[in-house]
Structures are given as structure tokens and as C-alpha cells.
Image (cartoon, rainbow, N blue to C red):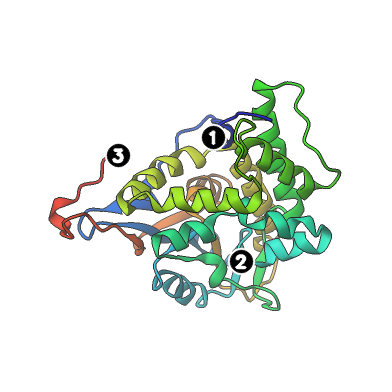
Amino acid sequence: MLRICFVFAIAGFFSAAGFAIDISDYFRPSELDASLQTAIRQFTPKDKSKPKIVLVAVGHIGEDDYYPAILKHVNQVNLVLHENIGNELFEELEALDPICAEVRGNMDTSNAFAKALGLETQNDYFHFKGKQKWIHADLSAMAYTKRILELLLSQIRLQVPSYQPEGKTLCAQFKSVILDIGCNSESTAPCNLKTLLEESMRSMASFSREQIAQTMLSEASIHSNSELLLERNQVLFEVLQKIIQRPVTTIKTIGILYGAAHMPDIEKYLVDKLDFHRSTEDVQWLTMMRVRPPENTVQSFVFNF
């Protein structure tokens, strides 16, 4: 069995893309009310015949009033281009490979993470099947999962060049990797997907919201120029380009609903390639997560980043 730190392997996904990105325009700490916030920003085209674009940065977990606030803004646009969100992502995978149902909780720990912190997940609120104005603008569920597995294997093979997961299907191989990384061959305790998820939940529950907030801020900066993130943004750009290049359109506003880490690269594309400019006066900040200091007083809490 492999004895590889899972966090180290995951961190290897995020290789630098070669340009500086400031994520604080879309994801920031607020010491005023000790919270993490995400932004909604509007962009206006130089060509007034083109639709305006609203970038709606979103976090994977949030307070119970966060996602209704996001949806309130999203519902005001004519068209929504969205990333891989909602339960539909896994439903698509499970339809192709039943083993995906087994590894679902281990592949996407946001549900367990949210539960441990008393928060909600975007999967509980975002449902786009049958909604004509919601357009998927991301890698397919299968392509997305395949790329994650490829990147994870590339990191593992830096330490164990001959490593090969068991199984013929994508999710079978993912299951093999999760077990090989997570299970300790020297332990006599049972080790399976269920016990690994339970162990992960116990670990999450041991962290305070302050610790989680600091980690989120640090990781967001790293993720914003990751290899996989930029690949996914390219899919979005291709979809967006086709829509705004239509000679005649009744679409006045396009909302882009993506993770906050994606937004600096998306803004760069809007400004540099499509000749949009940011409407600075229209920014709105939504509270994603409230951080509760031990003394339960805002004054005693300071973000360290």
C-alpha cells in the first residue's frame, strides 16, 4: 500500500500559470463582521450592442442565507453560464459507472465539510436541469473527473513511478487511489471508503471556523492559477465567445456563476480579449461564512494572511 500524504498529492494539482492574480477582488476576509465574503461584479462592453456580463463568484460551502442571496442575483440575468455545480454532476457519472456512487462522498467532501461546520453546500441549492437559461460551460463530468485522476496520478508517480491503480473504469481507479492513499497497511483496523470518510469528517470537526477561514484564503490564491482551473476556464471562454458574437441577440445580461478562484482569469479574458470594462461602482459583497471567534466578539478577531 502507498503511504502518501493525500494533501500533498492534491496540492500538486496547482502549478503556476505565469501571471500574477489578485483574488481579493472576488474573495476576501471582512474584519468588520469577522466573515469571508464573495463578490458580484458587473462588466460593460465597449460595443453597446453586446450584453453586459455579471461575474458571480461563489463558494462551495456557505451559510444558509448565502445561496438564496446568490440565486436572487442570478435570477435577474437573461442567461447563466455555470461551472460543474449541483448533484447533476455526480448523477451523470453514476449513470455511466455505478462505482461512482460508491466513491461520491470521498470524491466530493464538501457535504461532509459543510456538515462538520454547520454550513450548507451549493449542491443543495443549484439545480439546472430543465432550466433553459442555465448553460453548462465547463468540462463534462467525465472529463473533469478524468483530469483530476490524471493530475493526482502524476503526483503519486513522482514518489512511486510504477504505481498503477486497480480497476478498468474511471471511478474504479479513483476508488483504488483513495484506498491506497488513505489506508495504512500496518494498521489492523478496517479500512474502506466509509471508514476513510468518517475519519475525514472527524478531522474536519476538529478545526475551528477561524482555522478553516485562514486555509480557504490561502488555498484560493494558489488555486486561482492552477492548471486544471485554467483548462476549465478555456471551456467557458469558448461558450461565451459563441454567444456574444451572435449578430442579433435579445440577451441583455449574462451571468457567469463560477468559483471565486476562477474570477481573476475570467476578468482578464473579458478585459483583454473581449473589450469589456469593470463597472467599479456596482460591486456587491455577500457573506459566505461567518467566523466566530472564541470570545464571540468581533473586536477580538483578526485575519492573519
Residue furthest out toward the front: 188
Q: Relative to residue 53, is residue 220 depicted above or below?
A: above
Mark sitting earlier along the chain (1/2): 1
Image quadrant where one finds the N terminus: top right
Residue under numbered circle 3 = 305
Pinpoint residue 133: horizontal percent, then vertical percent: 64, 75
Give the side of residue 89 with respect to residue 115, left or right: right
Q: Nearer the viewer, residue 194 or 18?
A: 194
Residue 3 can be seen, yes or no: yes
Circle 3: is it few (<14), some (14-19), or many (20+) Cα within 10 Å?
few
Give the side of residue 95 with respect to residue 45, left or right: right
- Which mark, residue 11? 1
Amino acid identity at mark 2: Gly
Q: In terms of image quadrants, where is residue 250?
A: bottom right
Pinpoint residue 77: horizontal percent, then vertical percent: 53, 74
Q: Marks 1 and 3: in contact by CB < 8 Å?
A: no
Residue under numbered circle 2 = 86
Indicate the secondary structure of the residue bearing disc 1.
Answer: helix
Q: CA distance from mark 3 to mark 1?
A: 19 Å
Q: In terms of image quadrants, where is residue 287?
A: bottom left
Indicate the secondary structure of the residue bearing disc 3.
Answer: loop
Circle 2: is it few (<14), some (14-19), or many (20+) Cα within 10 Å?
some
Q: Nearer the viewer, residue 25 or 300?
A: 300
Q: Relative to residue 124, is residue 294 depicted above or below?
A: above
Amino acid identity at mark 3: Phe
Mark sitting earlier along the chain (3/2): 2
Pinpoint residue 300: horizontal percent, then vertical percent: 14, 51
Q: Which residue: 39% across, 40% down?
A: 218
